[in-house]
Amino acid sequence: MAHRKAGGSTTLGRDSVSKRLGVKIFGGQKVDIGQIIVRQRGTRFRVGRNVKRAEDDTIFALKKGIVRFVNKKVRLFTGKLESRKFVSVDELKIKMK
């Protein structure tokens, strides 16, 4: 009786599809209204001026301009100061003649 009976299926060979998270438009680059700047899970990057956070924590531009990433000190609920990353869009100022 050296053989096996009813071996069953293996647990190998399955993997989830990658979600393509991360920064899509970097600091100093131009962005249009509605363009995605960061895809993230949770609030790794926080929202600054002229950007909004979507339901899945994606950060997108509300105005046309240049993307800026800044580290700021934020006071936590415990009273401790910690550095956090903020994303904002500086509006392009167009001169009309």
Image (tube, rainbow, N blue to C red):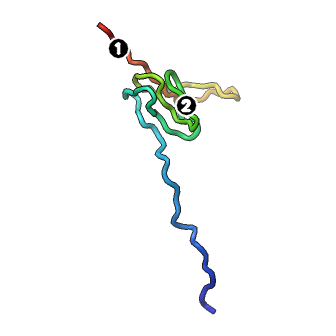
Pointer 1: residues within 10 angstroms few (<14), some, or many (20+)?
few
Pointer 2: residues within 10 angstroms few (<14), some, or many (20+)?
some
Q: Indicate the quadrant containing the C terminus: top left, top right, bottom left or bottom right.
A: top left
Q: Indicate the quadrant containing the N terminus: top left, top right, bottom left or bottom right.
A: bottom right
Q: Which amino acid does label 2 sit on?
A: Arg
- Choose the circle earlier in sequence order: 1 or 2: 2
Residue under the image location 69 percent in, 28 percent down? 77
Q: What residue would you read off at disc 1?
A: 94
In the rendered image, the vertical position of residue 1 relative to residue 19, given as above or below: below
Q: Where is residue 56 in the image (x, y as percent from the top left)?
A: 57, 38
Q: Position of residue 11 (x, y in %)?
A: 58, 68
Q: Which of the numbered marks, if any, corresponds to residue 15? A: none
User: SS for tag 2?
Assistant: strand
Question: Total marks drawn?
Answer: 2
Q: Where is residue 52 in the image (x, y as percent from the top left)?
A: 53, 27
Residue under the image location 64 percent in, 25 percent down? 75
Q: Residue lying farthest top? A: 97
Q: Residue lying farthest left? A: 97
Q: Which of the numbered marks, if any, corresponds to residue 53? A: 2
Name the one closer to the observer, 72 or 63: 63
